[in-house]
């Protein structure tokens, strides 16, 4: 067994007590944080991490003191005083002493009674979605399972209430606690997109015209998106499909499953199509959802005894209804636009990581259809993604939610229930890493408590990509089948690239 060791801290001159008193303690929760306490948006983030060694709980606890507990939000209650309750019960961050025994859970399952370790972990995570963390303690906990699965020697499960921070800030905190396997004293790095060179201030009439046109196009697209957003709130619902859950689904338990695919396969398609990782994964998701729904509708035709075009319901037929409206609430990290925050700098110390919810979202339409050319799914996703980049929709939804929550209460600023799913894509470490001396095998974050019956989360780690599903089993009873469709769709897209000889068009 590989020996685990305590994390070597990076020196910092900041005083944790000053941080607590100046930035968090006694301050009311932000409007966005309060929104995550509403019944239909009482959201928790769950991060499942597989390790290549058995977990040493004492080492983990010792390192939590110097990392997580330097974060004010991990050391504060969310509480209201008697005076606050008379004025509407406004929640505030209240400093408290943290007893790690209340937060770190180390169950000891009887391995002789466990038929499948993978199913035991899956059921354990699903059971967590049936419970909430008491507000009498800081709203996070960590579960350490020393049980060998098909993908890891042990599993850690971090559960954090979304009011503490969003996925990007928690990923930054996680990476500040990690080190490269190749260099135990070096922080891991995140994938970075190539920045476009700023245009020169000098230029002819054509250059100034193009710049002006680009600005006007952004404002026009934003206006169109805002109108569509308001129409959606008022009456425009997605088509009722087997993936569309009923209203009031935020409190239902979730089945959380994941599938690991090759990041190299995703990059192969990305480079061949001159697209982004997100374009490829959205395209793959569109293909998978089309396959899944076609099978579901085919089964409905067979059970109803209806015959469509002489053979409706057969697996090889197109059983999809026409003009399916299926949209995703796709989340966008706003830090590059609003925070001007260099994540690589904040990761140098856990106390430097700025937790919070600085996220907006866009309404992302998915194309549901059976395509002869699998690359059409990526082309469609790329075109829609390009259009959504030329809009301020995400910033608008953030400020609208913040304003409504502040002036009209959190019930008016909640998440949309008219869309079919949530979709999120967060980049992870580029290299193999260790966390508190334990080498990581995979990272699989997701959420529960959201109003939609389906959430798809994508995260990269080293040469792997994890696709995580969080589903309401009453709507999606077969999440493993949907994982199969996602894996098969990526294979079909990759094979299409190779068959067309596009894999030789770009150099990695």
Image (cartoon, grey):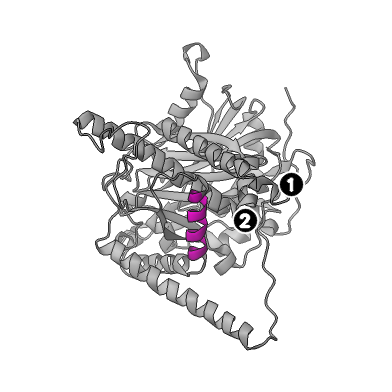
Answer whether residue 8 is visible to the viewer in this image. yes
| Residue that label 2 marks | 274
| Residue that label 1 marks | 9
- Choose the circle earlier in sequence order: 1 or 2: 1
Q: Classify 350 as above or below 487.
A: below
Residue at position x 34%, y 70% from top?
A: 227
Q: Is residue 416 left or right of residue 2?
A: left
Residue at position x 51%, y 69% from top?
A: 390
The reply to whether the magenta stretch includes residue 220 is: no
Q: Position of residue 443 (x, y in %)?
A: 58, 39
Q: Secondary structure at mark 2?
A: loop
Q: Position of residue 36 (x, y in %)?
A: 39, 53
The reply to whether the magenta stretch includes residue 386 is: yes
Query: What span is colored magenta in the figure?
Result: 376-388
Residue 212, picture quadrant: bottom right
Q: Nearer the viewer, mark 1 or mark 2?
A: 2
Characterize the local packing of mark 1: few (<14), some (14-19) or many (20 or more) Cα atoms within 10 angstroms: some
Residue at position x 48%, y 46% from top?
A: 138
Q: Position of residue 65 (x, y in %)?
A: 63, 43
Q: Is residue 375 left or right of residue 86?
A: right
Quote the CA–CA distance across marks 1 and 2: 40 Å
């Amino acid at each position: 067994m590989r020996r685990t060791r305590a994390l070597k801290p990076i020196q910092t001159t900041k005083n944790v007590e000053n941080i607590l008193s100046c930035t968090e303690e006694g301050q009311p929760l932000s409007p966005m944080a309060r929104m995550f306490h509403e019944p239909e948006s009482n959201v928790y983030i769950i991060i499942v991490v597989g390790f290549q060694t058995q977990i040493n709980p004492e080492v983990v606890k010792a390192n939590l003191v110097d990392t997580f507990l330097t974060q004010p939000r991990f050391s504060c209650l969310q509480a209201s005083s008697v005076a606050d309750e008379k004025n509407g019960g406004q929640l505030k961050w209240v400093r408290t002493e943290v007893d790690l025994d209340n937060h770190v859970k180390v169950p000891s399952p009887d391995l002789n009674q466990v038929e499948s370790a993978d199913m035991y972990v899956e059921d354990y995570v699903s059971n967590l979605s049936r419970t909430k963390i008491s507000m009498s303690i800081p709203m996070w906990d960590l579960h350490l399972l020393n049980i060998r699965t098909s993908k890891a020697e042990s599993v850690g499960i971090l559960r954090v209430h979304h009011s503490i921070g969003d996925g990007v800030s928690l990923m930054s905190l996680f990476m500040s606690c990690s080190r490269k396997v190749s260099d135990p004293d070096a922080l891991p790095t995140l994938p970075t997109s190539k920045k476009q060179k700023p245009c020169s201030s000098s230029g002819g009439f054509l250059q100034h015209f193009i710049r002006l046109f680009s600005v006007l196009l952004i404002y026009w697209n934003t206006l169109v998106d805002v109108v569509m957003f308001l129409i959606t709130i008022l009456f425009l619902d997605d088509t009722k499909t087997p993936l569309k859950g009923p209203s009031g689904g935020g409190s239902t338990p979730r089945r959380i499953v994941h599938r690991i695919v090759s990041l190299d396969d995703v990059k192969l398609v990305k480079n061949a199509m001159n697209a982004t990782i997100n374009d490829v994964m959205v395209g793959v998701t569109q293909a998978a959802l089309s396959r899944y729904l076609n099978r579901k509708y085919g089964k409905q035709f067979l059970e109803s005894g209806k015959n469509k075009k002489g053979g409706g319901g057969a697996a090889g037929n197109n059983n999809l209804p026409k003009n399916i409206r299926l949209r995703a609430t796709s989340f966008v990290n706003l830090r590059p636009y609003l925070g001007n925050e260099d994540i690589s700098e904040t990761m140098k110390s856990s106390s430097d990581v700025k937790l919070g919810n600085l996220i907006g979202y866009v309404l992302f339409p998915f194309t549901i259809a059976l395509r002869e050319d699998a690359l059409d799914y990526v082309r469609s996703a790329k075109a829609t993604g390009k259009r959504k980049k030329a809009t301020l929709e995400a910033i608008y939804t953030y400020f609208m939610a913040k304003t409504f929550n502040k002036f009209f209460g959190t019930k008016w600023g909640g998440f949309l229930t008219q869309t079919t799913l949530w979709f999120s894509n967060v980049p992870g470490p580029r290299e193999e890493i260790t966390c508190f001396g334990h080498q990581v095998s995979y990272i699989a974050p997701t959420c529960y408590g959201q109003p939609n019956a389906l959430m798809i989360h994508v995260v990269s780690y080293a040469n792997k990509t994890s696709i995580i599903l969080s589903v309401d089993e009453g709507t999606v009873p077969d999440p493993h089948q949907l994982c199969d469709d996602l894996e098969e769709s990526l294979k079909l897209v990759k094979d299409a690239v190779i068959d067309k000889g596009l894999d030789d068009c770009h150099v990695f």
